[in-house]
Amino acid sequence: MSVHSESPARTASGPIPVKIVIAGGFGVGKTTFVGAISDIVPLTTEAAMTTIGEDVDDRGSVDTKTTTTVAMDFGRVAVDDAIVLYLFGTPGQDRFGFMWNDLIQGALGAVVLVDSRRIEDSFPALDYFEHRDLPFVVAINRFGGKMYHTLDEIREALSIAEQVPVVSTDARGRVQVKETVLSLLDVVLQRAMSKAKTN
């Protein structure tokens, strides 16, 4: 399968819509990730971070970030003639966590983005998807093109199960984002095949 920027050829019933969630902590690159691969101008709900919200919005070590997603990011990308992906980026701030349950409704799987400089920020997203048994991959966003820990070190630090892929990516690059999304689709396919064999 290859991701391209053309609209899929429509059949009698049209291409199959597939929903994917992009999640992770504050400032890990979710909005950038969705924008890098979307065939359409992505819908974003970025709002300015103000002094009024300082008591509830934790910037952590991302003190240069001046905006935050307050609802979701949305993008669309054609995988091939038969499948169209709809990407939903979750808000990263804790106070918007109540929206996650709505955003994952009908989702096929998720990408959990991680900043290897502050991997502890990834625990809430990992716990969330593990408890809901939604297939996911962990993607380490290479900020500035750098990896601050190896993939094995991050897997161990986050106690990620062996069957969950841990990959590196660059949320700014279409090719890298495409490879990350395809790795998730592989996980979803393998799970579906495994379930089919047991039924």
Image (spheres, helix red, strand yellow):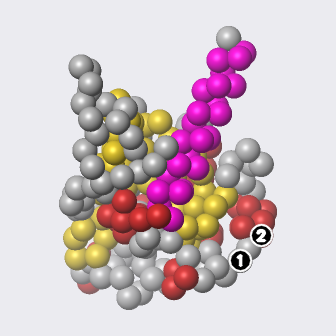
Q: Is residue 126 left or right of residue 53?
A: right
The answer to which image quadrant residue 135 occupies is top right
Label 1: which secondary element: loop
Residue 40 visible? The answer is yes
Does residue 36 appear left or right of residue 51 in this picture?
right
Q: Residue at x 26, y 83 (%)?
A: 51
Query: At 22% across and 70% down in the image, what residue appears?
Result: 47
Q: Position of residue 109 (x, y in %)?
A: 50, 41
Three-letter code for the amino acid on which mark 2 is drawn:
Glu
State the residue at coordinates (66%, 21%): 195
Residue position for label 1: 149
Q: Name the residue beneath numbered marker 2.
A: 153
Please name the amino acid that badge 1 sits on. His
Estimate the x, y position of residue 181 in percent, counting from the top left. Answer: 50, 51
Quarter of the image that includes the C terminus = top right
At numbered mark 2, what does the secondary structure look like: helix, strand or loop? helix
Q: Are marks 1 and 2 in contact (CB under 8 Å)?
A: yes
